[in-house]
Amino acid sequence: MLIGIAPCITPELLAVLHRMGHGDEIVLADAFFPGESCNPRTLRADGIRVAELLDGVLALINPDGHDPAPFLMMQPVPGDPLDPGVEREYRTVIDRRWPASPPIARLERFAFYERARRAFAVVMTGETAPYGNLIVKKGVIPAAPGGRPV
């Protein structure tokens, strides 16, 4: 175990987060997402909910501050119910870690799948909430006064 890293962050996920560059995206996918058929770099986080994993991830990386939508969720198919509590739960985590982040944006279902294909990685979770998928775009490490990363 490493001090200060959430137990939900596996060694494989830590390596992926480390290898990601700014502008790269990671998909925190619900249990029903077609991760393996969408992206060859798919990791497992079975039994862990997206909000818990998001909290662990956002303790290690920051969202892209140059993108107006560094957080993306799947837009529901017309006629499908949407639980607004899922987005609120994710937003609570985002606000705790990176409160200046813009609102979570929504992408049409097939546009979301296409974005997932191009993502750096997909992490399959145990999340069972419909439309519980979230894309996070990694940003540049913020600079402290003097220009060095914090």
Image (tube, grey):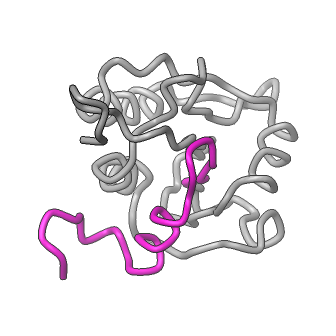
Q: Is residue 17 left or right of residue 5?
A: right
Residue drawn at (75%, 52%), measured in percent from left and top?
116
* Position of residue 150 measured from the top left corner of the image (x, y, whole percent): 24, 41
* Position of residue 80 measured from the top left corner of the image (x, y, whole percent): 73, 31
Label tally: 0
The residue closer to the viewer here, 52 or 135, is 135
Question: Which quadrant of the figure has residue 143?
Answer: top left
Residue drawn at (60%, 29%), measured in percent from left and top?
82
Any magenta on residue 128? no
Q: Quadrant of the N terminus?
A: bottom left
**Does residue 85 lie above or below 14 as drawn?**
above
Residue drawn at (39%, 48%), measured in percent from left and top?
61
Question: Which quadrant of the figure has residue 35?
Answer: bottom right
Residue drawn at (18%, 76%), measured in percent from left and top?
2
The residue closer to the viewer here, 75 or 138, is 138
Q: Is residue 16 left or right of residue 53?
A: right
Instruction: Find the magenta span and give its range.
Output: 1-28
**Does residue 27 lie above or below 144 as drawn?**
below
* Position of residue 67 measured from the top left corner of the image (x, y, whole percent): 60, 24
Question: Which quadrant of the figure has residue 147?
Answer: top left
Any magenta on residue 23? yes
The residue closer to the viewer here, 37 or 127, is 37
* Position of residue 24 measured from the top left corner of the image (x, y, whole percent): 63, 48
Q: Is residue 64 left or right of residue 38?
A: left
